Image (spheres, rainbow, N blue to C red):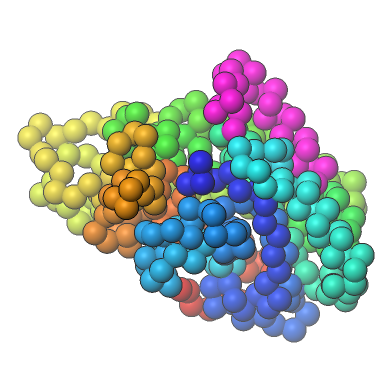
Amino acid sequence: MDNQPHFIYLFLLLSVITTAAGAYAHANSFTKLFVFGDSYVDTGNRNFTASSWNEPYGITYPGRPAGHFSDGHVFSEYIGVFDTLVAAPNMTIQIGLFEQLLEEKIYTEDDLKSSIALVSVSGNDYNAYIARGGSLLGLPAFIVSVVKQLGLDLQRIHDLGVPKVVVMGIQPLGCLPQFTKEYSYEKCNETGNLASLFHNLLLTTVVEELKLENGEPEFVMLDMYDAFMSAMKKHEDETASSSILDQGSGPDISGQSAVSGKSGVRTSELKDTLRPCCAGITSEDSCGDVENGEKKYNVCIDPKMAFFWDSFHPTQAGWHAIYSVLKCSIANLFQTELWGSF
């Protein structure tokens, strides 16, 4: 389904990283960003069949659908390695397309010398594994195979001449609305989060091995798990402090059940950090679905108050919160000072 982050298809170039979060590139810094990955970093490169080109996507920015899997900006604007459920190029094919562009001299050696690659693998492979009936018992072995292939892809990008390769660790999958709705958006799915932690543990080892093999710290991992958790906790605290009259407790992102007050009734569903702003009317519907001209989804009044946009993707506000946690790390990566924000 197009609303799921199954889109390991895109490859794009931001020729100057000032396009990312108002970044200002100093002399001798990296000035080109090659992005490989999925819907967490897609700025509208997929064709118009993707659900991200339908309403209500893009309602915050630019005010219309623009191919972003959010209400506005996505992560790559602030700064699956195997086949998935969508017939689109996987990570390995994306790198092949990149290699083809290099062979055609679209980008020169000088272009590469001043570039960074950002690689996003946000869980598409695991969603596909589950959707295809993969067992929980077999999941650890599958995670090992995914991370192993990802390591090969990272090395291949570096071998093509990109001096620094940054890979995004996986977010807490168990906290995505797709997996928290069974708990009424009140807690995260512990199994999903354990799978993410295992993926990130393996990926950390792979990145360290790549550093040793290449002799320099040319491979970097962004800790998306902690960034998501920190950003969600901040959102939870901020919404809780603004709703003292609401005796019901906020969601517990640690994976444990939230304890409700004795007599409180929520005055706003957006106080639930794990609840998406845009959701299908029924369990069979998704954000953006339309049937016979009738919208099959509901959208919250103010997306800026929500952390998650749909079942898998943060809102622009959510991405900004995540970026804020990672801002210093990103600035160090690009050897640049970041000014302002969207």
Q: Is residue 186 left or right of residue 320?
A: left
Task: Please identify the quadrant where the C terminus is shown.
Answer: bottom left
> Was residue 133 drawn as part of the magenta stretch in this picture?
yes
Q: Please indicate, yes or no, whether residue 267 appears anywhere in the rendered image.
A: yes
On the question of residue 75 being in view, the answer is: no
Q: Which residue in the rendered view is the most extreme toward the left?
A: 263
The residue furthest top is: 137
Q: Residue furthest front?
A: 292
In the picture as drawn, the residue positioned furthest to the bottom comes out as 27
- Residue 131: where, in percent of width, then height? 55, 28
Q: How many marks?
A: 0
User: What residue is at 67 percent from the left and 57 percent from the top?
Assistant: 10
Taking the spot 14% from the left edge, 34% from the top edge, the residue there is: 261
Query: Residue 339's spot in the image, x, y percent?
Result: 53, 78
At 29% from the left and 33% from the top, the residue drawn is 184
Residue placed at 22% from the left, 54% from the top?
241
Residue 27 on image: x %, y %: 75, 84
Task: Using the image, determine if residue 292 lies above or below residue 260.
Answer: below
Q: Is residue 27 above or below residue 235?
A: below
Q: Is residue 304 above or below residue 283?
A: below
Left or right relative to 315: residue 6: right
* The quadrant where residue 194 appears: top right
Task: Give the overall secondary structure of the magenta segment.
Answer: helix
Name the one closer to the observer, 88 or 103.
Answer: 88
x%, y% of residue 138? 64, 18
Segment tinted magenta in the rendering: 128-153
In magenta stretch: residue 15: no
Q: Nearer the viewer, residue 77 or 25?
A: 77
